[in-house]
Structures are given as C-alpha cells and as structure tokens.
Image (cartoon, rainbow, N blue to C red):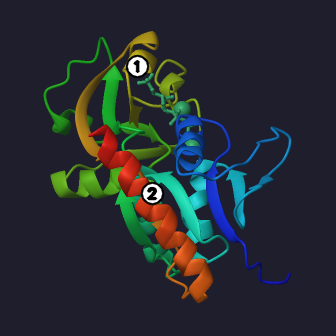
C-alpha cells in the first residue's frame, strides 16, 4: 500500500456522531458527498479522504497512524487508551480539541425494582457493558468486586434477559434506560466528541492542511459559544 499524501480523516459511519461530524467538516469548507455504500468519500475541493467506519475503530486507526485525524467520543478514546496500555500497544494520539456535540455520560444503571443503596449494592453482581476498562477503573477506585458481562450492543436489555444485574452504558437523553425499565445510579464518565491526530510526524503540506482545518474548527465552535 502506498502512503497517501491526502489527509485521511476517520468519522463514524452511522450513529450519534456521524451527522454532526459531517456537518462540521462541511462548515469548515470541506466539500464531499457521502455514498452510504462506500467506506471512503473523497473531497472534491481539498486533498482529503473521509473514512467512514465504526466509532470503536477510530481511536485505534489514529493511534496506529492508519489515518491522520479522527472525530470520536472521548469515552471511546479513553476506553481504547486503557485497553491498549494494558496490552502494550501504541496508545498515543494528540487531542486537538473538544467539540461542541456528542455530549453523553457513561453511567451505571439498574432495574427499577432494584433497591440501590450506593455502589456497594453492586458487590459481587454482574454488570453488562461495552466499556469494560472504564467500568473496571471506576469499580477499582470504589473497591467494589463485580462480574463482567461484555456486550458490544443491546447492553440495555441484559438485565431483563437475565444476563446481568445492572449495566454500565452511555446515556444521552435517558430514553433508552426508561424504555428498558432501568434507572441511572452513578455517572462514571462525562464525554463530548473530540478531534484527535496521530502522533506520526506529517509532511509540511499535510500539517499545514491540518492546521487550516483546526483553525476553522476553532472558529466554528467559538462562533456558536
Ligand atoms: C448509546 C447507548 C444507548 C443510547 C442511549 O448508544 O448504548 O443505546 O446511546 O441514548 P439515550 O439516553 O438518548 O437513549 P450509541 O448511540 O452511542 O451507539 P453504539 O452503542 O452503537 O456505539
Ligand atoms: Zn459504538
Ligand atoms: Mg447503543
């Protein structure tokens, strides 16, 4: 594979951050059209390629230097960083700035009928999550032993399905918890979207393009404040 001299930016293919990520880049003057079937969208007016991938894959792609920039939730970034540090894999990237969308929190939640008296109520119980590292860090701080139930999706149905006693999942509006008969007990991590850069040194023209995009992002975000 030849090294591309085009700037590669990874964004979420579909999900909470995808529309806002595209909107931000368009507002910064990057023209492109997304074909839902395609992984890559080439910009028509700048040497930029957008890679549309699963959010969970974005931090690793940046940390491995496969792409130059990524737009991702801080929660996914932090989770991947802890995971990679524990495996001795490259876990470095540069957080260029926090963005003004993608607000959510990673929280513990239990079924409505659960008599929750604080996090010690979870001692020895099973907790379903897609964020095992952030959960472990919190529970270690609190000195609580719990059992894992690792699910990449549908975490919110785990208690009703008898797979777990509680969950640790992202909450934005709270609608998912409510629809599944769960209530939020502890916020363990607050998150926004952010833009990250790989630590690999860039050719001058590519770094200049990154600087230009970042300064436009700064302008766009500040204008909305
Ligand atoms: C999160 C979480 C819930 C939902 C909560 O998923 O897993 O499903 O959002 O939002 P609400 O409080 O507004 O109902 P997300 O969209 O981040 O997608 P993913 O789990 O597929 O990555
Ligand atoms: Zn995801
Ligand atoms: Mg979800």
Q: Is 191 in front, or is 145?
A: 191
Q: Is mark 1 within 8 Å of ligand 1?
A: yes
Query: What residue sits right under mark 1 in the picture?
Result: 177
Mark 1 or mark 2: which is in front?
Answer: 2
Rendered residue at 52%/54% (across/down): 71
Residue 138 horizontal/vertical position (percent): 26, 52
Residue 19 horizontal/vertical position (percent): 59, 35
Residue 49 horizontal/vertical position (percent): 73, 61
Query: What residue sits right under mark 2 in the picture?
Result: 216
Residue 132: tell me if it is visible.
yes
Q: Which disc number belongs to residue 111?
A: none
Q: Is 166 on the left or on the right of 150, as rendered?
A: left
Q: Secondary structure at mark 1?
A: helix
Q: Is 86 on the left or on the right of 153, as rendered?
A: left
Q: CA distance from mark 1 to mark 2?
A: 37 Å
Residue 25 horizontal/vertical position (percent): 57, 49
Using the image, determine if residue 131 lies above or below residue 67: above
């Amino acid at each position: 594979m030849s090294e591309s001299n085009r700037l590669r930016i990874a964004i979420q293919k579909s999900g909470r951050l995808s529309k806002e990520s595209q909107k931000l880049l368009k507002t910064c003057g990057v023209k492109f059209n997304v074909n839902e079937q395609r992984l890559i969208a080439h910009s028509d007016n700048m040497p930029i390629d957008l890679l549309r991938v699963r959010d969970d894959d974005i931090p690793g792609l940046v940390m491995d230097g496969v792409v130059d920039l990524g737009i991702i939730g801080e929660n996914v970034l932090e989770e991947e960083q802890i995971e990679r540090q524990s495996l001795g894999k490259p876990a470095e990237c540069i957080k260029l700035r926090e963005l003004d969308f993608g607000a959510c929190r990673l929280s513990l939640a239990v079924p409505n009928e659960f008599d929750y008296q604080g996090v010690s109520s979870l001692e020895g119980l099973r907790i379903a999550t897609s964020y095992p590292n952030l959960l472990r860090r919190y529970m270690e701080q609190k000195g609580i032993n719990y059992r894992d139930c690792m699910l990449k999706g549908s975490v919110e149905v785990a208690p009703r399905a008898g797979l777990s006693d509680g969950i640790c999942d992202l909450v934005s509006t709270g609608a998912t918890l409510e629809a599944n008969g769960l209530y939020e007990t502890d916020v363990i991590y607050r998150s926004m979207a952010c833009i990250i850069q790989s630590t690999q040194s860039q050719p001058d023209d590519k770094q200049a393009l990154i600087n230009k995009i970042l300064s436009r992002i700064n302008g766009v975000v500040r204008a909305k404040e």
